[in-house]
Image (spheres, coloured by chain):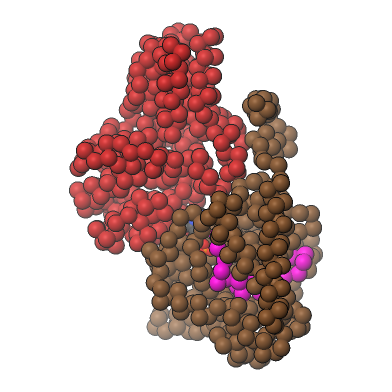
Chain colours: A brown, B red
Amino acid sequence: MATKKLDKVEKQFEMLQILNEEGEVVNEKAMPDLSDDQLKELMRRMVYTRIWDQRALSLNRQGRLGFYAPVAGQEASMLASQFAMDAEDWLLPSYRDIPQLVFHGLPLTKAFLYSRGHFEGGQIPDGVNALMPQIIIAAQCTQAAGVALGLKKRGKKNIALTYFGDGATSQGDFYEGINFAGAYQAPAVFISQNNRFAISVPVEKQTASKTLAQKAVAAGIRGVQVDGMDPLAVYAATKEAREHAVNGEGPTFIETLTYRYGPHTTAGDDPTRYRTEELDNEWEKKDPLIRFRKFLENKGLWSKEDEEKTVEQAKEDIKAALKEADNTPKQKVTDLIKIMNEKLPYNLQEQLEEYTKKESK
Amino acid sequence: MAQMTMIQAITDALRTELKRDKDVLVFGEDVGKNGGVFRATEGLQDEFGEDRVFDTPLAESGIGGLALGLAMQDYRPVMEIQFFGFVFEAMDSVVSQMARLRYRSGGKYQAPITIRAPFGGGVKTPELHADNLEGLFAQSPGVKVVIPSTPYDAKGLLISAIRDNDPVIFLEHMKLYRSFRGEVPEGEYTIELGKANVVREGNDVTIITYGAMVQTSLKAAEQLEKENISAEVIDLRTVSPLDIETIIKSVEKTNRVVVVQEAQKQAGVAANVIAEINDRAILHLEAPVGRVAAPDTIFPFASAENVWLPDENDVIEKVKETLNF
Ligand SMILES: Cc1ncc(C[n+]2csc(CCOP(=O)(O)OP(=O)(O)O)c2C)c(N)n1
Ligand SMILES: [Mg+2]
């Protein structure tokens, strides 16, 4: 009996797909309303991010960048969902969600400074509604409930959108976040990018749940599973969740099925220890860029020149941003002391003097 | 005797105890197939099976609760917190639950749990990976806090920690994992918890320290020797409880003390060491006890680490200040 009921729950969470691996529309009625220009822009962002990811990995090897969490494979999941955000919406990213942060308004230079471990990398510019990348797994989930409740109390027609991984759904903060948002009917959208692994641990070992999306049931909120390699499905699901949220109909939890092609981070992870080549190949066949490119080419919206222009633009931007990062004054301990508190206590005042002397040597 | 890095010595200690006692269980995030993000549990799942060495879902509070529950079933859990900065997620499990189990059960139950975690600065990690949080636990009655500074100590102390019938927090400084090798005997041996080690004898001043700062202090002592200053260096090995006897004996000999810690200055282990010396040996002091520590900010963003972390020169300067008082 009990298993039968569980089957019923699981069936509600069948994966939403609009574009199949061949770039064919398989679900016409779910097609989102996107203009040709918007479709092209989304493709441009995905290609741009793929190039940036490749550059980031090689810059890291040369010691020119620090901590970096690769994103190749997850472009649709990341960028098509961010594409559904309003410019005024609030973004709460994890360490991997730097591309969304950049397309939401963080200058690329700041992203590089963040990677290098410079505090200026955390300075979100005025007018950009976002928090810094979160390191503590799932901490952003409860915070998203808070931002969303604040937006609701202020009468804003905006949402808080937060990203985290599959592993993150094991944390208490995840359950607390979706439950709080549900309890307050706060305008939050929670996106778990299920890339199948939390470092080395496969999602099957993370939970007995067949889908992550079904975890929404217990919180009494909407849950959706989408093909995370399909930009149109990701966009449609996020857009709908956003509309629900701003219409006062409560939060949504979206699970995107995706894959990270690269290592967990650049800090020495070796995926061959825990993933097979077959699995890698299986997922690379689902590549979001390949299928979206086919779709756009068939519509006459994307050409070789578009592709080349985007690649060139990405390379140029990266070069310029790196130069700016290189020219940013080195961070000092005295800088860090000064930003500890609004008003420095006696110990920090003394240490400010001490380190000013030390750093002028 | 084999030459090992500290990480190898830790794996060796885990293997030794897994072999000796079938109730020892090793678990945490990525410790199974992946062998831990630093490879501390490398090969252990293959050797002892998934029943004994296993991955957990990603939740430190869950890991802590699981450990306590397994202890109630007479297992001897060795849980890993992937980086000690994430221990806040398990703070309730450790401080409110494990540390109080014996007390709350009127002495009936015990929590023979070892909590292993990498920590410490100088390896340019992202934020929250390097913090020195030992002081928080040194302030928590009911748990011991052990910090090895050499491969030999790491193995002997970890074996003792696993065999101890109370919760032990075992902190592994990341900078020491692979920076040097040392002799490590095969098979089992233990180093008593709560006992410090005089790693260098001297007469003019005592430097009391632990963790990666032992190496820093030893280098400072070598420099000082060239200037005819003879420094004794004590490695605390266990920062809670302190080895008062060894500390006081040395203070009574040298009459001058500098305490060195990598952690921020405010509160913390050094403050406690100084208070104990003041309580027990103030009349033996020729100068106020010096203190070398990091400034009272959040652990710095990676690119400012080098200036932020205390170094040899800080130790040398403080020693001279104490001598010239
Ligand atoms: C509280 C906490 N525990 C552990 C870690 C170490 N850690 C960093 S990423 C990660 C895996 C996260 O996996 P997932 O949620 O699937 O996200 P992904 O990295 O795959 O995007 C772990 C265990 C952490 N950063 N924070
Ligand atoms: Mg994942």
Pick the quarter of the image with the N terminus of chain B.
top left
Query: Is residue B292 visible in this depiction of the protein?
Result: yes
Where residue A150 appears, x then y in whole percent? Answer: 73, 59
Does A150 sit above or below residue A254?
above
Does B151 sit above or below residue B324?
below
Query: Is residue A82 visible in this depiction of the protein?
Result: no
- Residue bounds of the magenta highlight: A69-90
Where residue A19 appears, x then y in whole percent? Answer: 60, 86
Q: Image quarter for residue A133?
A: bottom right
* Residue at the image position 21 percent from the left and 51 percent from the top: B19
Image side of residue B6 versus residue A334, left or right: left
The verdict on residue A86 being magenta is: yes
Q: Image quarter for residue B237?
A: top left
* Residue at the image position 69 percent from the left and 58 percent from the top: A319
Where residue A33 appears, x then y in whole percent? Answer: 74, 84
Image side of residue B113 versus residue A209, left or right: left
Who is closer to the viewer here, A110 or A141? A110
Does A13 sit above or below residue B247?
below
